[in-house]
Image: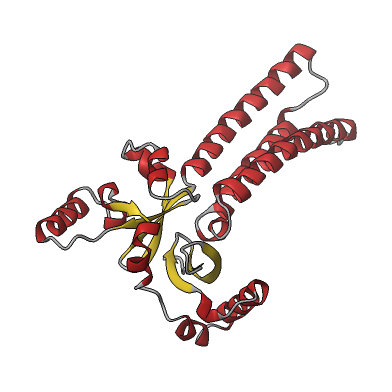
Amino acid sequence: MMINFTLIKSKLKASGIHFCISSVVFLILAFLIIFRWYPPPYFTADGGWQGIRIIAIIDLILGPFITLIIYNPSKLKKEIHFDLGLIALIQAIALVWGIYTVHSERPVAVVHWDGEFYTLPAKHFEALSIPLNELEQFSKTRPALIHADRPNDFLKLKEILAITTEQKLAPYEQFHLYRPFKENQDKIFSYKIDIDEIITTNAKMKTELDNFLFKSKKKKEDYVYMPLIARYHNVVLIFSNDGDVAGTINAPYKEKS
């Protein structure tokens, strides 16, 4: 069986051209994912890395691979155009699905409840028919920093529990509890964690904190530290005393169940 090196060379060339074009698209999407949709620390903590891998598989592997398999320069021009159009359609459909998935999973709210912050993706609010611009009333940051207020009234607490049970919505997911972050800053910071206790048992987190303090030229006591519960690993948010996020410390990755 003779190997047609000319055909292989033509296939590799077509696949290479496809890869170069796809690379430009990938770089644009990677910029959006890293700097817009999943800015640090959410890129690693809340799914940005997983999202960029989905886009890479679709854009850099799927499309060029299909071209490598299907492209044949010995076909009629009409057939070649049909094949290339079909390849482009398949990749476009897959890419639209990938972009929609990654975009809908992006964190748009970081909600405080009972001493901890939780990330919520865009799809959570879409499922509840809540426009994302509604979050701006609580915070102008992106993702929006929000306080979920625990009421003292027994009946209201009972209502929260009923929603949690019946609608499967945790308290930090219940929009009617949301309050502006800055207006509730003192209440939120009363839950601050003892950072010394944490870094004593985690050398990597201690190194991150030391590097942060060195760059900021401030002392450890000048900041407030709060835990953030994210999808892939938890984070310690470092707040300035005026309520702005000044930095973060990465906690260990969660073990997969």
The answer to which of 52 and 67 lies nearer the viewer is 52
Asked whether, in this view, residue 21 is left or right of residue 45, the answer is right
The answer to which of 221 and 53 lies nearer the viewer is 221
User: Residue at point 40% right, 58% down?
Assistant: 182
The answer to which of 152 and 106 lies nearer the viewer is 152
Image position, residue 33 (x, y; %): 60, 46
Q: Work out which residue is located at the far bottom of the displayed protein and give it.
A: 200
The quarter holding residue 230 reads: bottom left
The quarter holding residue 154 reads: bottom left
Quadrant placement of the N terminus? top right
User: Residue at point 86% right, 36% down?
Assistant: 3
Quadrant placement of the C terminus? bottom left
Q: Is residue 97 above or below residue 84?
A: below
Count of numbered badges drawn on the protein: 0
Image position, residue 98 (x, y; %): 55, 39
Q: How is the image coloured?
A: secondary structure
Asked whether, in this view, residue 129 is left or right of residue 107, the answer is left
Q: Is residue 192 above or below residue 202?
A: above
User: Residue at point 76% right, 27% down?
Assistant: 71
Q: Work out which residue is located at the far right of the displayed protein and give it.
A: 6
The answer to which of 91 and 118 lies nearer the viewer is 118
Image position, residue 60 (x, y; %): 69, 41
User: Residue at point 15% right, 59% down?
Assistant: 157
Q: Work out which residue is located at the far left of the displayed protein and give it.
A: 155
